[in-house]
Image (cartoon, grey):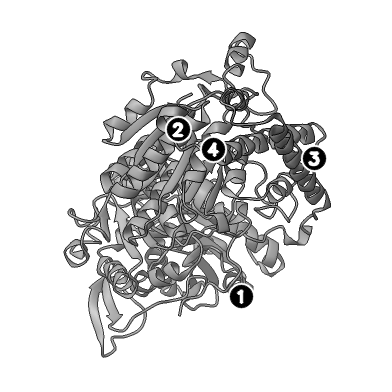
Amino acid sequence: MTAATDKPHLSRAHALDLLKQMIRIRRFEDKCAELYTQENIRGFLHLYDGEEAVAVGVIPVLEKRDRIVATYREHGHALIRGVTMAAALAEMYGKQEGCSRGRGGSMHLFDQAMNFYGGNAIVGGGLPLSVGLALADHMQRNDIITACFFGEGAVAEGEFHESLNLAALWGLPVLFVCENNLYAMGTALVLSESETDIQRKAGCYQIASEAVDGMDVVAVEAAARRAVHTVRESGKPYFLECRTYRLRAHSMFDAQLYRDKAEVEAWRKKEPITRFQKWLEINNMIHPEEVTRIETEVAAEIAEAVAFAEAGTWEPVEHLTRFTYAERAAQAD
Amino acid sequence: MLQGTTRPGTTEITYRDAVREAIRDALLRDDNVFLMGEDVGRYGGCYAVSKGLLAEFGPERIRDTPLSESGFTGAGIGAAMAGMRPIVELMTVNFSLLALDQILNTAAAVRHMSGNQFGVPLVIRMATGAGRQLAAQHSHSLEGWYAHIPGIKVLAPATLEDARGMLWTALQDPDPVLIFENVMLYNMTGKLAADAGAVDIDKAVIRRPGRDISLITYGGSLWKTLEAANALAGENIEAEVIDLRSLRPLDDATVMASVVKTRRAVIVDEGWRSGSLAAEIGMRILEQAFWNLDAPVGRVCSEEVPIPYPRHLENAAIPQTAKIVAAAKAALSRS
């Protein structure tokens, strides 16, 4: 772990919170998988298992006024940003009490109050959006950062390159966070990129960059602090590559024919929650009963969320075409 | 070319000038408005629409972009979501296809998939249409495709008043609005009231009243259709010419009232015939006014070919006055 050097002031309370937040995501998504097999959640369900340290390491470093753009693998980001577990789960049920009124589902969690701009399910599609959000803040002289999360698969999209170029060219406060889990669905990075050292691509656009062990929550947080500080001070973009791994299937329809079980098992040994928990134990920063307490609290939160989603209501079919356009009169003066 | 006579307080102006005045006015009225696109600044706009605006408003608000249609259209979407009022210029409708993902999957979808939490008050302008011998990658009329998409509005200003007045209304709209400017209209001159301002963006307008047949059109084809109506008048046929103005939403009420009155309709649309906006309008007429019809609904569309370069072939590919006259006569069983 890099905590001793990069994050000397890691307090016990903070360490416990990092652990708890990762466990929240993991247990929540375990429950989501179960609810999916029970057909309470339908459509596509993309789980973040193994990658939790990225959202937990980056998002709390941002201010509440900052903006977040995420992908279709965004349950963790939403929870850490402050979208309630209940509202997220109700959304995945398709209930109108969901954080997007049930219109979006698992891939489209949005929350205006949290400055959470989705839940974008076109790979690479969120990057231009983040550039635009930052452009508005730049033009309005707002002290606001936009953090844009995307996978390494997005790097192959033209929009990745267009967005990095625009952000650098116009000097926009975007924190690009590449969650490099080595597979774009089932296509390995080596099969899709001629240059597999992704952070180097940022340098071609004159964007400062850093790659970090994305399975190490303390290292991610330390890097995120440097990154956010740099963007805040300079008003310019920064590129943070978090090297991580997806331990579960791409979605629930994935037989994982494209990778060896041994590879997955090897990565499982670096899994961020167990790893951090062990590190805390070795350093006498955690007591076993504290882990039990975290697990109990998270289980209660999940139970509440399930009850909320179950009790949620279906939007009347008569409302089908609502929210296609604004409902207030759209006339000019 | 405009309807009506010269009034005091009017100025001679081109369609291009009218669009520029609309942009200039918007920039003056609202600090959150800015124009962004390829060559809108130093070059003055591919069609010279934004010429002079850079000097007046500076590079922050007249923002030249790299050739990144998807990137800067997406940036317009994000900026609109964060409180700005961007006008994104896509040089031509053909190039807009590089931004189609952002328009369809983000701009048109965000309000819905966020459960009404986020809207995209963005205006996207682009040139459309054939007639300048620009061949198969600069000449198409794909506005009918865009009119297929719920979540956006699609406008086709054909007159100086609409070129001048639609933009401000579109900018006030809480949802994305696409404005299609036919390339053959930029040089059109006419008189425009000095105090011309915002106009509605959801009503079709009858540009020429008539009792015998309804000619339904929009954009660059409006003027050919009015010319056809003049020719028909010489043969004692009084055609009513409807300018749709808005392609989404479509103003069914105005169209149906006219068709019920004339009992005959021909739709003139520079889009390709198959799967065209003309097909949609024709079907709506069948759904809503079938029993009022005295003849099959006719269509004059573009031929099913990429727009060719030679002038005689380009002319043959798109709607022309003679074809409109012939289609109207066919609907009236006249030869």
Q: Which residue is mark 1?
A: B257
Q: Position of residue A66 (x, y in %)?
A: 45, 52
Q: Nearer the viewer, residue A161 or B197?
A: A161
On whether disc 4 and disc 2 are found on a single subunit, the reply is yes
Residue A178 numbered mark, or none: 2
Separation of disc 2 and disc 3 at Cα? 31 Å
Give above or below for B150 relative to B195. Answer: above
* Residue found 36% across the figure and 75% down from its top: B161
Are the residues tagged 1 and 2 within 8 Å (C-beta)?
no
User: Which of the two marks, 1 or 2, is nearer to us in this view?
Assistant: 2
Which badge, 4 or 2, is on the more N-terminal residue?
4
Q: Which residue is mark 4?
A: A55
SS of the residue at dot 3?
loop
* Residue found 55% across the figure and 40% down from its top: A14
Which badge, 4 or 3, is on the more N-terminal residue?
3
SS of the residue at dot 2?
strand
Separation of disc 1 and disc 2 at Cα? 56 Å
